[in-house]
Amino acid sequence: MDTELYKELVEQAPEAILYCDREGLIRLWNRGAELIFGFSAAEAVGQSLDLIIPERLRGRHWEGYFKVMETGESRYGTELLTVPALHRDGRQLSCAFSIVMIRDATGQPLGVASIMRDGTAAFEREKAMKKRIAELEAQIAGAPQAVTTASTGPGRERPVPG
């Protein structure tokens, strides 16, 4: 395949595809990233990933990121990770992503490419469903126990603990 096809795939994908160098600076930001995060490529390229990382998670993120750059190892090349992220307007998003380690000719990490999908709507639905289940379980736990009967034959019902 020629490089124009790859370029078109990356640029037009609805998923966010971005590449960050060893220092965590954004070097590639596709149309999908623009749609998901609200920043244009011109605004994002050259900026730190802090652009989309919630402040409370930055320390943990950078600790892990620089460890990956040092060791060249990450479990997120095969596992899907879901993390909070930030939209340009300040909304918190729930993004699922995996990474691709980009290496030089000697095998040393040059940076990380990430493929991300906005899962905020699904996350919110799941959160609402869990809340509703907890409410229903609380109602059931607070309801008086009903006594039902089991038939042992015509006219001979016996109580069965509920």
Image: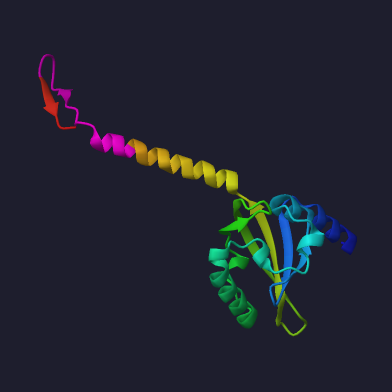
Q: Position of residue 123 (x, y in %)?
A: 54, 47
Residue drawn at (72%, 71%) of the image: 25
Q: Left or right of 105: which side holds 140? A: left
Is residue 143 located in the magenta-colored stretch of the structure? yes
Viewer-proximal residue among 105 and 57: 57
Viewer-proximal residue among 75 and 18: 18
Q: Quadrant of residue 22?
A: bottom right
Side of 120 relative to 22 (left or right): left
User: Does residue 156 appear in the picture of this structure?
Assistant: yes
The quadrant the C terminus occupies is top left
Total labels: the figure holds: 0
Q: Quadrant of the N terminus?
A: bottom right
Q: In this rendering, does residue 2 appear at all? A: no
Instruction: Tell me: 21 left or right of 119.
Output: right
Color theme of the render = rainbow
Work out whether 28 lies above or below 9. below
x then y, percent, for residue 19: 74, 67
**Residue at 71% from the left image edge and 56% from the top image edge:** 16
Horizontally, residue 75 falls left or right of residue 27, namely left
| Residue 99 position within the rendered picture, expressed as x and y whole percent measured from the top left | 65, 66
Based on the displayed image, in which of its 4 quarters is residue 20 positioned? bottom right
Q: Quadrant of residue 65?
A: bottom right
The residue segment tinted magenta is 137-156
Q: Is residue 1 above or below residue 67?
A: above
